[in-house]
Each structure stands twice: as C-alpha cells, then as structure tokens.
Image (cartoon, rainbow, N blue to C red):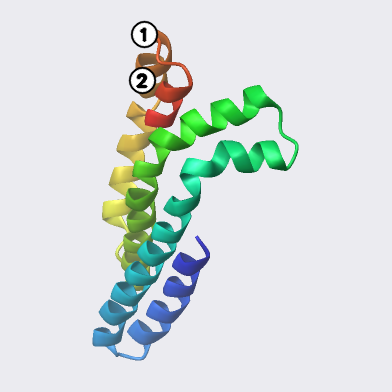
Amino acid sequence: IGMGVALESMASQAYGAGNYDHVGLYLQKTIVIIFALLVLCFCFYPFSEDILLAVGASEIAADYCQRYVTIAKYGVGASAMAQCLRFYLNAQKIYKPQSVSSLVSFLIFPIYPWIFITKLGWGVEGAAMC
C-alpha cells in the first residue's frame, strides 16, 4: 500500500503539471517495484509456519497461518495491481470504474465466505479464497 500511495502522490503531481507521459511511467515503475518485492516475499511464504513458531506462536496458529498463506499468496499480486490501477485512475480524476467495481464487490462479497467456508466446508483454505 505504501508504494501505491507514493504512486498516487507522484501521478497526481505529474497529471496536474500536464506531464501525462510521466503518469504512465510512474504506474509502470510502481508495478515493477511491487512485483519485485512480491517475489522476495514469496520466498518467505513456505517458511511462515517455521518463522511463527520461532517467534513463539502456538502450533495451531502457525499451522492455520501456513495453510492460509499457501492459498492467499496468489491473490496478493492481483490486489497490488488493483491498488496501483486505482491510484492511477484517481490521479487522473477518473472515479467511475472504481466506484462501480467497489459497489459490485460490496454486493457479492457476503456470498463468497458462505460458499467457500460454510457450504463447501473448506475452512481456513476457503477463507483464503475470499
């Protein structure tokens, strides 16, 4: 999120100054940096249970965390990309796409946990899918 906020500040300034090419360049640079950091984070995900046990977490909590991270890690990149695009559009004063997508997400999200956690009985793995 911190990189996205930096994108929002820099892209807004570039757009306000009329440097429209810079707005796109800032988006591209931010995406490259965020995905490089994600690759670094992905290196630690397989060891999340061991890391949590080393800092004193209970075995049950560490196990749940490991199971959750194993599934949720695939959505982190999409979430980061969505944040970057949201800030990119905000910098250009384009609000309708994010408003519509937020409304749709708000309306259909309550169904997802019920399906994945309760109906299918996937538990922690189902929560990671939401």
C-alpha gap between disc 1 and disc 2: 10 Å
Q: Secondary structure at mark 1?
A: helix
Image coordinates of residue 12 in percent, x first then y, are 40, 78
Residue name at image x 36 percent, y 23 percent: 112
Residue name at image x 68 percent, y 36 percent: 53
Residue 38 lies left or right of residue 62; in this view the side is: left
Q: Relative to 40, is 47 above or below?
A: above
Q: Secondary structure at mark 2?
A: helix
Res 92 → quadrant: bottom left
Image coordinates of residue 115 in percent, x first then y, are 35, 15
- To which residue does mark 1 refer? 119
Residue toward you, 41 or 117: 41
Q: Relative to 15, is 109 above or below?
A: above
Residue name at image x 57 percent, y 26 percent: 63
Q: Relative to 10, is 75 above or below?
A: above
Res 80 → quadrant: bottom left
Residue toward you, 75 or 16: 75
Quadrant of the image containing the C terminus:
top left
Residue toward you, 90 or 40: 40
Res 71 → quadrant: top left
